[in-house]
Amino acid sequence: MQVTVYNCRSFDEKPLFMKYAEELGLKLVLCEDAPSLDNVSLCEGSRCVNVITSKVDARLMQAFRNHGVEYVTTRTIGYDHLDLEAAEACGIKVGNAPYGPNGVADYTVMLILMSIRRMGAILGRSALQDYTLAGLNGRELKDLTVGVIGTGRIGATVVGNLSGFGCRILAYDLYEKEELKQYAEYVPLDRIWSDADVITLHTPLTEENYHLIGADTIARMKDGVVIVNTARGALIDSGALIEAVESGKIGAAGLDVVENEFGLYYYDHKADILKNRELALLRSFPNVIVSHHMAFYTKNYVETVVRDSLTSCRLYMEGKKNPWEVN
């Protein structure tokens, strides 16, 4: 039983892949690079392929199938980077590897606090030994209303975390959770746009919510609103976000994800000219914090996704019930 693993980080994932492969009786082909048409031949002899957030489009999915691949699993909760229609068309099953919600939820609250306390500007000044205070006056979370869009596992944990700060919490989700109503008030999206001082996104990316935050929704928000996104970059229209930061309509943003990040994050690009102008502009603003899609990245995450993604491959190849299959 052979599995080809792409995007394999040698400094943390590789030892765990070797450990769990031995326990599960699997043979591995490890590749540090993202899957591409140039290295797709590495999956020859493997019924399963294991990836992370690299985009697998229709051409690459078909190339996997042509080399005998039957199952593609991603070491992430989200799987919008995988072309599910193409996978179904060529007979490939797809799986994901959900991990605990605490890492992303903790990171979300950190970004909220850093945004309302102007931490990006503070760190920028400190690096230059500028210890002045003008322009750094922050706000206290207890005085704010936070809108949480999406109350799945991560969003629900964010609500629980925020409940200890004394802020008012509004929530939106198609499926309300009774246990959260002791901390948050479920409201329509229009109430989030109009009432929230801070808006944080925790919903998967779908065709319906692409650019959920754009010029029209931003116009309905409070002046100085804070936007936090640890979900998917395309939930926010980058152009509209930039215009709103420049006009002052958006007071601050904490972004762990951005549009068009595929092929960019997790690589060293110090000597490269990046083809993402919006990212360059966002990083230039003192009131915008941008990190490289790493809210999930904890020791618990790495152990969980390596173990579960390989277990998922083993179950698939044995023809057993696989709780990680998504199509």
Image (tube, rainbow, N blue to C red):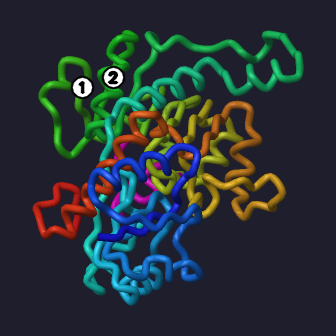
Local crowd at mark 1 within 10 Å, few (<14), some, or many (≥20)? Answer: some
Residue at screen point 46% across, 31% down = 108
Residue at screen point 57% across, 35% down = 254
Residue 96 included in the magenta stretch of the image = no
Q: Is residue 86 above or below residue 245?
A: below
- Badge 1 marks a residue whose secondary structure is strand
Residue 207 included in the magenta stretch of the image = yes
Local crowd at mark 2 within 10 Å, few (<14), some, or many (≥20)? Answer: many
Q: CA distance from mark 2 to mark 1?
A: 6 Å
Q: What range of the chain is rendered magenta?
A: 202-214
Q: Is residue 123 above or below residue 203?
A: above
Which mark is on residue 185?
1
Question: Residue 237 sits in which quadrant?
Answer: bottom right
> Measured from the top left, where is residue 175 in percent x and y?
17, 43
Q: Is residue 138 left or right of residue 271?
A: left
Pointer 2 with pointer 1, Cβ within 8 A: yes
Residue at screen point 35% across, 20% down = 161
Comparing 309 with 191, the one in front is: 309
Query: Disc 1 residue type?
Result: Glu
Q: Which of the two discs, 2 and 1, labels the residue nearer the N terminus?
A: 2
Comparing 260 with 210, the one in front is: 260
Residue on which disc 2 sits: 169
